[in-house]
Amino acid sequence: MLSEEWCKRELYCPACDSDRLTGSKPNFPAVDFSCAKCEQPFQLKSLRNWNPKKIVDAGYEAMLRAIRTDRMPNLLVLQYSSTWSVQNLLLVPRMFFSESVIEKRNALSPEARRAGWVGCNILLSEIPTDGKIPMISAGLPIRKEQVRSEFSRIKQLADVPPSLRGWTIDVLRAVRRLGKTTFSLHELYGFESELKSLHPQNQNVRPKIRQQLQVLRDAGLITFVRPGKYSVRT
């Protein structure tokens, strides 16, 4: 594909100082590129029409297995124009994939060739802004240093176990939705019912929110100002 050839020629690794990505090996079907230096995997989604809310992906169950076993690659979403020029390139780091951002699609009809197969959508709108790093915007490339700095800022989230990372990302999304540089624990409790619906197996939502604020603090994304008060690190 033209987009894959462009990526091989133009792309660099956002996770380290390597200025080149290489094509994946045949036995890694969900990975299109990888970095030979730091071994970060990347999957490419190329499309003509840019949808900032969601993109179509593959099988629903396969996606959930990849998330639960921490085998998701970083996602590159590339939009091209009618003249095949790259307009936008968005990086979604692998640690931002949780079950909360995966939407189950309806099963294919009995008449379809793959009858009963269930696909999924990736809900870009549900991913915090920290997890959507522009590499090209409106046809203009973002400086490598800026892209790598943004990736470095969130890379500690990869140390959070997959079984807990969904909570971490959902609480971070709630923090971002407040739209404030400084916020209170009481304000974050306003998302209690929403978080409970996302994690129905957990009956102690408020303690879990406080726990995840500690995780976000340890990851360097927020700071504690005083009891019950926090600030967002930029």
Image: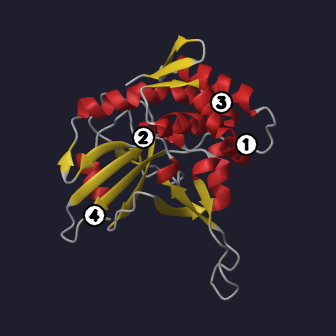
Amino acid type at mark 2: Thr
From the viewer's perspective, is 107 left or right of 9? Answer: right
For the residues labelled 2 and 4, the Cα–Cα distance comes to 29 Å
| Residue 160 seen in the figure | yes
Q: Which residue is mark 2?
A: 129
Q: Which residue is mark 1?
A: 196
Q: Earlier in the sequence, mark 2 or mark 4?
A: 4
Q: Is residue 74 above or below residue 104?
A: above
From the viewer's perspective, is 18 left or right of 120? Answer: left
Q: Which residue is mark 4?
A: 2
For the residues labelled 3 and 2, the Cα–Cα distance comes to 21 Å
For the residues labelled 1 and 4, the Cα–Cα distance comes to 44 Å
Identify the residue shown where x is 40% and y is 57%.
52
How busy is the neighbourhood of tag 4: few (under 14 within 10 Å), some, or many (20 plus)? few
Instruction: Give how far across and how far down residue 130 sits, in percent.
Output: 43, 36
Q: Are marks 3 and 1 in contact (CB under 8 Å)?
A: no
Q: Are marks 1 and 4 in contact (CB under 8 Å)?
A: no
How busy is the neighbourhood of tag 3: few (under 14 within 10 Å), some, or many (20 plus)? some
Farthest-out residue, top: 226
Amino acid type at mark 3: Pro
How busy is the neighbourhood of tag 2: few (under 14 within 10 Å), some, or many (20 plus)? some
